[in-house]
Image (cartoon, rainbow, N blue to C red):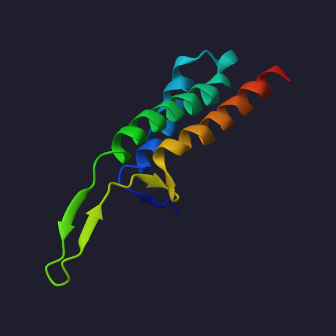
Amino acid sequence: MVVWSGRGILSVLVLIVSFVLGVKLFPPAYSDYAFVLAFFLAGAFSWFMGKKWNEKEGRTVIDKATGQEIVFKPNHSLFWIKMQYWAFIFGAFGLLFLVQQFV
């Protein structure tokens, strides 16, 4: 079960699409690098777009009954982790696959 909020699911979709394209573009001898490329591309996408979408200014509304201000901020996350922090997770997996190629 995938749990996401806002546009957080796009991180996984970019990972899958970049992996499929990497497998198609790399020759069979280098197809293992498709994992590395996919994780690095998904990490870069998650970092830049997550920061852009999650750092937008919140919308403030006032509750008529209590007069209290409520701020609605954007939340784009995947498995309760903000989208831009998935860049570190994807980057770590990319480095892991890259190191495995040389061992």
Query: Residue 47, image x and y in percent?
Result: 48, 36
- The C terminus - image quarter: top right
Query: Residue 33, image x and y in percent?
Result: 65, 23
- Tell me how many marks there are: 0
Camera-side residue: 59 or 95?
59
In the shown orientation, is residue 41 left or right of residue 96? left
In the shown orientation, is residue 86 left or right of residue 51? right
Q: Is residue 56 above or below residue 97?
A: below
Camera-side residue: 24 or 74?
74
Camera-side residue: 53 or 20?
53
Residue at position x 39%, y 37% from top?
49
Residue at position x 67%, y 37% from top?
93
Q: Which residue lies furthest to the bottom in this view?
A: 65
Query: Residue 58, image x and y in percent?
Result: 27, 54
Q: In this view, does 76 lie above or below 41?
A: below
Q: Which residue lies furthest to the right in this view?
A: 103
Picture quadrant of residue 22: top right
Q: Is residue 30 above or below residue 72?
A: above
Query: Residue 34, image x and y in percent?
Result: 60, 26
Residue at position x 51%, y 37% from top?
15
Q: Residue furthest front?
A: 67
